[in-house]
Amino acid sequence: MADAAVKTAGKVKSVTSTANPLVKQIKALAMKKNRDREGVFLAEGRKLLTDAMEQGWQIETVVCSSEMAADPGFAATAARCRATGADILEVNGKVLGAISRRDNPQTVIAVIRQRWKEANHIAGSLKAPGDIVIALDRVRDPGNLGTIIRAADAAGAKGILLIGECTDPFSLEAVRATMGSLFHVPIARLSEDEFVAMALKAAGGVQIAGTHLQGAVDYRSIAWQEKPVILVMGNEQQGLTTNLAGACDKLVFIPMAGQADSLNLAVATGIVLFEARRDNLVMRTIEGAEGVSSA
Ligand code: SAM
């Protein structure tokens, strides 16, 4: 990819028809096969665009309402995107609605180049005790995947490994659920065999903990901070494959008290992840959050 510094500035175009070929092309990115072919995806909202830009992701096109284009604060963001080659497409509400498939669409939608990491690169970032990578076995639900990416970001995980046929982290629904964390968390995909080989190679230096409904160990009893960790989570319907369960050093269980057979995948991931990262979590003030009296 060309260096941002030598990129030609993008163009500004105005489009009012949903039949415009450019609009049709962007709309088609709702389908995975088109995202895969083009290597790009859609992100909605000004915050996601800013997050992507600040993290150095390549913005290909910024679609925005003419009202948004006239906003001085947004104009600065758009100018920065243009300088790195992004086209700016000023459209009406009908076009925005058609692209996002929503009645109340965001006033900004960005087309962004996908970014995948190598699985070995993510595994290689496990250096110190407390470091953690989350491995997901055939995660199917985009909302679950987006929520896990957000939790991984919040907990300071080093990355996510998608094992086997997983839902696309770049689908509109998954991207929405990440709330921008997609731009902070490295993601790689690999086959089950590749993961098992990686687990064998890492044996000894890394603790590989699978979560399992037949797990014999209470997740609260693990010495999570002894070594770096790969936390392996099972598929929503079937749990972990026998092969993956066998590649884990231990299988942990989250004790429950009510009648539910199991927890939702994203909830289970959050519970174990935050326990594993307990010693690394910090109190901080979140910008924009309402203050509360401590009295
Ligand atoms: N029917 C599936 C099964 O038999 O494993 C249920 C899968 S559960 C909805 C999805 C994943 O969340 C599980 O594979 C496991 O990784 C994790 N999980 C959910 N509840 C859990 C619990 N109580 N203890 C350990 N892991 C749990």
Image (tube, helix red, strand yellow):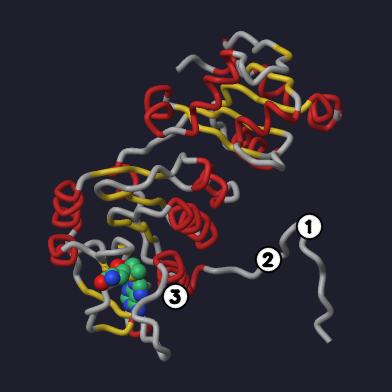
Quadrant showing the C terminus: bottom right
What amino acid type is highlighted by mark number 2? Arg
Q: Residues within 10 Å of mark 3 (few under 14, many from 20)?
A: some
Residue of label 2: 284
What amino acid type is highlighted by mark number 1? Gly
With 148 as the anchor, is 12 left or right in this view?
right
Measuring from the top left, give residue 19's x and y in whole percent: 61, 16
Which is closer to the viewer, label 2 or label 1? 1
Residue situated in front as seen by the camera: 144 or 125: 144
Q: Is any atom of residue 223 visible in this view?
A: no
Q: Residues within 10 Å of mark 1 (few under 14, many from 20)?
A: few
Q: Quadrant of residue 80?
A: top right
- Identified at 72% across, 64% down, the residue is 285
Measuring from the top left, give residue 63's x and y in whole percent: 67, 25
With 262 as the anchor, is 1 left or right in this view?
right
Residue of label 1: 288
Q: Quadrant of residue 191?
A: top left
Which is closer to the viewer, label 3 or label 2? 3
What amino acid type is highlighted by mark number 3? Glu
Q: Is any atom of residue 81 visible in this view?
A: yes
Label ID, residue 210: none
Residue of label 3: 275
Real-space Cα distance between discs 2 and 1? 12 Å
- Identified at 22% across, 79% down, the residue is 214
